Image (spheres, rainbow, N blue to C red):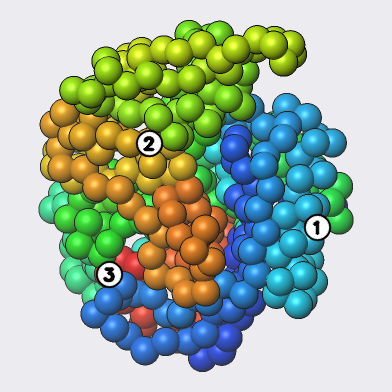
Amino acid sequence: MSIFNSSSFGLPRIKPLSSKRSHVVSVLDIGSTKVVCMIGRLTPRKESAVLPGRTHNVEVIGIGHQRSQGVKSGVIADLDAVENVVRLAVDAAERMAGLTVDSLIVNVSAGRVGSDVYTATIDLGGQEAEAGDLRKVLVAAGQQSQGNDRAVLHSLPTGFSLDGERGIRDPLGMYGDVLGVDMHVVTAERAALRNLELCINRAHLTVEGVVATPYASGLAALVDDEVELGCAAIDMGGGMTTISVFAEGKLIHTDAIGIGGHHVTTDLARGLSTRIEDAERLKVVHGSAVANGADDRDMVAVPPIGEDDRDQPSQVPRALLTRIISARIEETLEMLRDRIQKSGFSPVVGKRVVLTGGASQLTGMPEAARRIMARNVRIGRPMGVSGLPTAAKGPAFSTAVGLMIYPQVADQETHAGQGGLFSPFSGGNSRFARVGQWLKESF
């Protein structure tokens, strides 16, 4: 049976984690450069000043990653190729963990991920705001986002208002006439999600939950203060670059552009007349996003495209590589700067930007980003998990690690479907008392 049912909220929803027991979580990061499967054991942890709001420690017990095939700019272009790579990555992770995977939490970058804020109000008539009133206003906001061609990935209340006074985190028990809520809703095109589901089903697996790539990478790469004060996480992948903006502990905006590290490689291959794989090696070994004084003197050997062994590599100054790379990097960073400005969230982001993803590792990237975006920039590596092999501790694995962290924050979301509200309120009366805590939790 398809996970995409007639309800606009028909995506599978991850069950809230029990804070008293351990869980095994399997995730799959399908990117344009690589496909990563991680299996992790989540064990309950005590409340801590480090990463507050996290309920479990995450230990990676299995990991498998393969070079991606059949994915272009986050979009599945060849079902057979993607299915094959998914099988290989999952099989490697299963062997390492010593267990079999049935279902996975999967990321999505394709389908033109959209980000909108919906506002709804209900009349309290001067009475105390009760849990039922919160449920009613959340449903009212959620229903505005329903559409036939798009599916809701995330639905997050970002703040309540009482009688026009905004910025109220927990209105439960307060008196007023009009209760309002701002709801951040992240959506994607259904067709892209169906293709994603199809690939995973063909590998005899099911989708347990779907997470927007920018949300996942932000969860892994940002520290608590950044999430609370306001920060943008920019995930620079092979075929896509995504933006997530966090503030007051919540995801408040997402965006994406179809440019990534692979575009830099292609520019080099064209500009130097060499093969894609040779251009990638030149980029990694000799490339830089900023010019260096020695670039004109240093010469780099560029292998020819032809198959003839007698063809000698040509020698080019490293300055030529830098010029080709920096042109594309500057264009990308300018686009990102303009997208943040256009979103209206530039004041929230302030001076804080964190770069993550494989393409952020290019030499000189933080310096170029600081100059063009006029903000403080750091490289974000995945945090908050143990058991990662050394090769998987870099920015390229932030999305996969974020998918492991996501189940701990999934219950911050609200989903209004045909069956009413699927949310932190649905777990019985004992949950109502924790509504305030749920709203205050960052992660």
306 to 143, vertically: above or below: above
Residue under numbered circle 3 = 440
Relative image position of residue 220 (x, y in whole percent): 41, 59
Residue drawn at x 22%, y 56% is: 226
Residue under numbered circle 1 = 205
Q: Amino acid at mark 2?
A: Leu
Which mark is nearer the camera, 3 or 2? 2
Q: Amino acid at mark 1?
A: Leu
Which mark is nearer the camera, 1 or 2? 2
Q: Earlier in the sequence, mark 1 or mark 2?
A: 1
Residue drawn at x 69%, y 11% is: 310
Q: Quadrant of residue 191?
A: top right
Dot 1 surroundings within 10 Å: few (below 14), some, or many (20 or more)? some
Report the side of 273 relative to 81 (left or right).
Answer: left
Separation (CA) of disc 1 from disc 2: 35 Å
Separation (CA) of disc 1 from disc 3: 35 Å
Dot 2 surroundings within 10 Å: few (below 14), some, or many (20 or more)? some
